[in-house]
Image (cartoon, helix red, strand yellow):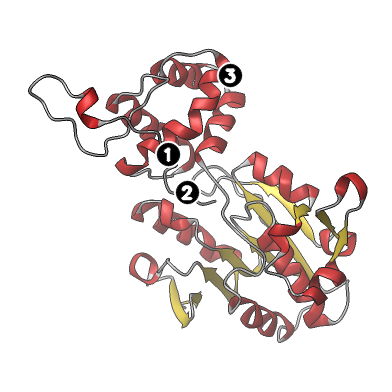
């Protein structure tokens, strides 16, 4: 689960909007359609933190405006204050839409490719009578867990490897896309022709330009909605490996430490934790995890 950079907003000439004798800030975003005060944004920041643990920086105000304007238009609200009142009073349905709008899912197949040889060496070296569990903890639209599935099929040389993949995300729209397993050909450009042929079914006719993940890959993955910030996690221990990549950077340090502490009892003693390239867990969980290099961690004790 990642937050995009703010979308570009149309800007008016600063001098045209300046009050007499007052210079308008150069490059200030103009929120044309809906009133969106700083107080509204601070309220929004608190709501998304309370619900999802996501810390939105002040420079994300234009992004929040762009993402939520569609909902205001659909619901006929004229101000963000009205919309936020509605979110807080309408129950879970609109709150889910609010959260989904403020999260985005920038990902692709075999992202950070150095992780996959480490994973398959780790799994193939384990001795167990039960299927090994791998948890993709912020699975987005499915590219990560399906990449794991493809990698283990190749490593074990069978489409029935002794591995279960649990894939979870907070965003219900992303999970729906992941469960469908249908991707545009542009989304598959990072795959080799061999993997594309082996693991996908190309569409024809009305489905031309799209491909579906093959059933033997899809059956290895179980999708679940999970809020890492709060609530119970429907994850069965022991877990051989956890992928939590490029999502933790949007939590504050205290929330990161809380989540990492909850990972610890789920992992096997020899389990691994895979992080994103911009994440370093040593500074807020050095007593729990130690680095194995290349953004891979193992339990410290």
Label 3 packing within 10 angstroms: few (<14), some (14-19), many (20+): few
Query: Could you tell me residue 177's position as x and y percent?
Result: 72, 46
Q: Give the residue number, with chain letter if any, for mark 1.
A: 63
Determine whether label 1 and label 2 are within 8 Å by CB: yes
Q: Is residue 19 left or right of residue 256?
A: left
Check contact, mark 2 vs mark 3: CB within 8 A.
no
Q: Which residue is mark 2?
A: 4
Residue, disc 3: 74
Q: Please rate how many residues cluster around mark 1, counting C-alpha atoms within 10 Å: few if below 14, some from 14 to 19, many from 20.
A: some
**Which residue lies at the image location 42% right of the left edge and 44% below the top edge?**
6
**Mark 1 vs 2, N-terminal side:** 2
How many neighbours does mark 2 have within 10 angstroms: few (below 14), some (14-19), or many (20 or more)? few
- The reply, left or right, for residue 279 in relation to residue 73 is left
Residue 19 lies, in percent from the top left, at 15, 20
Work out how far the residue at label 1 is from the one at label 2, CA to CA, in angstroms: 8 Å
Horizontal side, residue 165 vs residue 211: left or right: left
How far across and down, in percent of the image, does residue 137 sit? 60, 57
Please tell me which of labels 1 and 3 falls first in the chain.
Answer: 1
The image quadrant that residue 171 belongs to is top right
At 67% across and 69% down in the image, what residue appears? 190
Q: Residue at x 36, y 36 (%)?
A: 61
Distance from the alpha carbon under mark 2 to that under mark 3: 22 Å
Q: CA distance from mark 1 to mark 3?
A: 18 Å
Residue 191 position within the rendered picture, expressed as x and y whole percent measured from the top left: 72, 70
What secondary structure is found at the residue carrying circle 2?
loop
């Amino acid at each position: 689960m990642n937050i995009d950079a703010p979308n570009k907003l149309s800007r008016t000439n600063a001098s045209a909007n300046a009050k007499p004798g007052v210079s308008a800030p150069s490059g200030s975003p103009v929120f044309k359609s809906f009133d969106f005060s700083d107080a509204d944004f601070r309220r929004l920041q608190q709501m998304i933190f309370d619900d999802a643990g996501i810390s939105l920086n002040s420079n994300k105000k234009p992004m929040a405006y762009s993402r939520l304007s569609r909902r205001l238009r659909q619901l006929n609200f004229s101000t963000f204050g009205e919309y936020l009142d509605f979110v807080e009073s309408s129950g879970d349905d609109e709150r889910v839409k609010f959260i989904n709008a403020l999260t985005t899912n920038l990902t692709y197949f075999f992202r950070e490719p150095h992780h996959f040889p480490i994973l398959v060496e780790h799994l193939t070296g384990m001795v167990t009578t039960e299927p090994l569990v791998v948890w993709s903890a912020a699975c987005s639209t499915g590219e990560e867990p399906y990449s794991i599935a493809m990698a283990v099929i190749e490593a074990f040389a069978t489409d029935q490897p002794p591995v279960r993949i649990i894939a979870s995300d907070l965003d219900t729209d992303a999970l729906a896309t992941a469960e469908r397993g249908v991707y545009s050909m542009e989304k598959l450009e990072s795959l080799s022709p061999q993997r594309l042929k082996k693991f996908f079914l190309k569409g024809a006719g009305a489905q031309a330009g799209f491909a579906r993940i093959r059933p033997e890959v899809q059956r290895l993955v179980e999708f679940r909605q999970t809020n890492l910030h709060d609530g119970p996690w429907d994850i069965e221990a022991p877990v051989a490996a956890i992928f939590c990549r490029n999502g933790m950077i949007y939590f504050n340090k205290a929330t990161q430490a809380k989540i990492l502490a909850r990972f610890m009892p789920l992992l096997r003693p020899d389990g691994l934790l895979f992080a994103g390239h911009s994440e370093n867990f040593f500074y807020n969980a050095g007593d729990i995890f130690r680095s194995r290099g290349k953004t891979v961690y193992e339990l410290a004790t």
